[in-house]
Amino acid sequence: MKFSKILSGLILFTAASLSYAENYSDLAKPFFKYTEKGEYRKAVNSVLESGKPWISEQSIKEIGTQFESLKEMLGTYYGYEKILELNIKNRMVLEQYLARFERQPIIVEFIYYKPNDNWRVNNFLWTDELDDYMQEHAKFSIFSERYTKPLVDKLDKYTEKNNSNK
């Protein structure tokens, strides 16, 4: 499903500094809490508000309006589930969530960065193009299994052989 030129693909926001916390997972909780209450603009504001030095008030309003339009297009919000977490040296973390709506889900992604003692949201986006997401994942899965399975099988045989010789 394509919502509009603005919403098709990715809605993206990057700032040098946004919300801060000692635990990066705490940064996504207010976003989903407000979304659950149907307060979509507040959900976006919870992510973008402290980025005001780097993002204009007008941009925050526009992104809030775009996210709020999901309410009419997707119907009732049912909840969210974490589907992916990638961590680089406990300094940068990507979390993806599947946000479930009546009509179809969307993927919400947060990238957190910890330059010193506290985590901050460094990047925030959502996409409705799950067909593309799933097709890319399927390609990776096929490629991964085709080339890694023979290597794993050889390693297993080697390990079994060496363990039986002891």
Image (cartoon, rainbow, N blue to C red):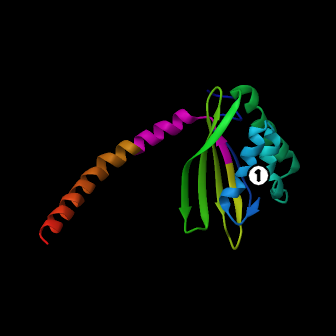
Report whether 58 appears left or right of 126.
right
- Report if residue 10 is visible in the image: no
Secondary element at image label 1: helix
Is 21 in the magenta? no
Q: Nearer the viewer, residue 120 or 59?
A: 120
Is 126 in the magenta? yes
Q: Nearer the viewer, residue 135 or 114?
A: 114
> Residue 142 in the image: x percent, y percent?
36, 42
The residue segment tinted magenta is 125-140
> Residue 43 in the image: x percent, y percent?
78, 45
Identity of the residue drawn at 66% across and 57% down:
25
In the rendered view, tell whether residue 162 sits above or below residue 143: below
Identity of the residue drawn at 64% across and 41% down:
80
Residue 163, quarter of the rendered image = bottom left
Report whether 129 appears left or right of 20.
left
In the rendered view, tell whether residue 157 sits above or below residue 105: below
- Report if residue 87 is visible in the image: yes
Identity of the residue drawn at 65% across and 34% down:
8
> Residue 2 in the image: x percent, y percent?
64, 28
Q: Which residue is mark 1?
A: 47
